[in-house]
Image (cartoon, coloured by chain):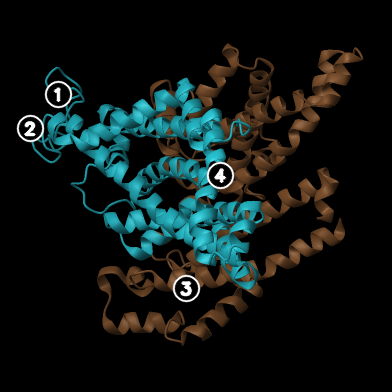
Chain colours: A cyan, B brown
Amino acid sequence: MSVTEAETLELDLDQPTGLWREAGKRLRRNKAAMIGAAIVLAFILLAIFAPLIAPYGPSERVGSLAAVPPGPSGEFLFGLDEQGRDLLSRVVFGTRLSLMVGLVSVVVGLSLGMLLGSIAGYVGGRVDNVIMRFMDLMLAFPAFLLAIGLVTVLGRGMWQIMLAIGIVQVPIFARLLRGSVLAQRQSDYVLAARSLGTPGRSILLGHILPNALAPVIVQATLAMATAIIEVAGLSFVGLGPQDPSLPEWGRILADNANRLQSAAHLVIFPGFAIVLSVLGINLLGDGLRESIDPRLDL
Amino acid sequence: MLVFVGKRLLALIPIVIGMSLVVFLYVRALPGSPAQALLGERATAESTAAIEEELGLTDPIHEQYINYVSNIASGDLGLSIRTRRPVWDEFKERFPATIELSMAAMAIAIMFGVPLGFLAAKRYQGFLDNASLVTSLIGISFPIFFLALILKYIFAVKLGWLPSIGRLDVTRDLAHPTNFYVLDAILAGDSGAFWDAVRHLILPAVALGTIPLAIIARITRAAVLDVMNEDYVRTANAKGLRAAIVDRRHVLRNAMLPVVTVIGLQMGLLLTGAILTETVFSWQGLGLWMLEAIRFRDFAVLQSGILFFAVIVTVTNLAVDVSYAYLDPRIRYR
């Protein structure tokens, strides 16, 4: 029996379960995480099928202009806004914007952060020093202030805002990746790969990154929640998406902040849309963290 | 210990220089010129040029930077373009407002967060534990301005229990030697003003303190759980020490290390939250100051104000590091 055959036999006997399968099992047993996953899934479906679910278009006028917009009724479940648009439809379509902001900004933060962090961790030395000092510098500014600063320079288009929120997240991902890469670099399998003559780039891409990924995925999930809250916050201080017709949750809420007395529904519904989506993502992210590293029970 | 602190202080120098450079470039990168913001509709080519000349905006960029740095170093922060008052004077009024608010928020967060986390850990996986986990997760998921709006609506508008905006009743006369209004009232021996200031503080502080409260509760829970399984706790219990003593001397004292760190690291979060909370409650602090400066392109305020923010965060982080090194001697020698 050759060596490979022996290995195969052994593998069959042991039914090896990898990190991810184990984590998946733990995740499915975690009730809170499953509730979170259900909420997130519901919002994703809302976003995809918004035109089918929303009774009207997001900018469609179905009532008359009103200083005191009518609240929830049988006909309009969430009530109308001051321009006579159906609030339910606006909130449903707003799901698309919020999820997109979360997704795109995390992709920006994650890809830039991963690039910088893994280079810093793998190359080390002066490169590491320069990159990480710059990241420290970014972290010295409170995140929301940094986002405000970037938006005022880049402009208030939807893409600029997503870019700004993404850039704010870069140092967090860079630090995380660097730490992970440094830890993995010392490991035996990297030494083995190197002694086999594997070029540096494939060691980094093929060996180190996949193993350093677990905490990054958790952070990415939680960063999505932060992004949704941040874009709403930007809208609230008047630095959100410029286009007033966009049904952005934070914007709807901010525009009606002083109508709480007369038309509370315009604040409450978009507000709870934010809370619920963020809560769902946080529950899922927490569950992921616990399932990937059960010791990190925070 | 001194060596450790000295090293950390030295390491701050390049960071602060970097920060000043970033802030300087940022303010220059802003669209719209301060001269135009200042003149508004009345702007003509000549008056714009005259103001730019006066503000030194026509100098070469590196000279502007050198001017900026040397002015800061000599304590001259210039005049606010909008109010024509010295930036430093405005800062002296605004800074205590934000610190007062942040301190009150942090006090609430610690007062409720630590006991909550401790009790949750003691009743691990019991009802209280699960309830506090869920509550804290909901707390973290609330956008701070939404929470602030709801609190303001319920307790100020509907119930009328607490004032909705500002730091003090407008009709009240109080000297402000420190600009910490609660402290000012104590110094003046004016109990009416004291309670007025405290009542104004409650809603914004609760709104701002909720997220740190939730985070502190979670960290405390995790830390206490960790420590409760340590051998020395088992030993203390085994030798018959009363449970309250074990909790206080053995569990809490050791569990506080990570909690202290987290408390320090909340400073950035508090300042960020202050921007939003101050907006909701018209609290005349640093956050509103910055937003107004952005709106009016007030370069002078912006380039100092943002730097203040960053320096506050950096210094707090340093203080956390130092206190941690003090609490845990192993860190000093690393």
Provide residue A166's location: percent of width, then percent of height.
Answer: 41, 54
Label 4 crowd (10 A; few <14 / some 14-19 / many >=20) = few
In-front residue for pair A85/A199: A199
Q: Which mark is residue B90?
A: none
The verdict on a common chain for dots 1 and 2 is yes
CA separation in Å, label 4 and label 1: 73 Å
Provide residue A80's location: percent of width, then percent of height.
Answer: 16, 30
Q: Which mark is residue A2?
A: 4
Mark 1–mark 2 CB contact (< 8 Å): yes
CA separation in Å, label 1 and label 2: 10 Å
| Residue at the disc numbered 2 | A62
CA separation in Å, label 1 and label 3: 50 Å
| Residue at the disc numbered 1 | A76
| Residue at the disc numbered 3 | B25
Q: Which residue corresponds to the image point at 83% horizontal and 25% vertical from the top-left?
A: B231
Mark 4 or 3: in front is 4
Mark 4 or 2: in front is 4
Can you say which quadrant of the picture contains the C terminus of chain A?
top right
Q: Return the chain for callout 3.
A: B
Provide residue A260's location: percent of width, then percent of height.
Answer: 31, 30
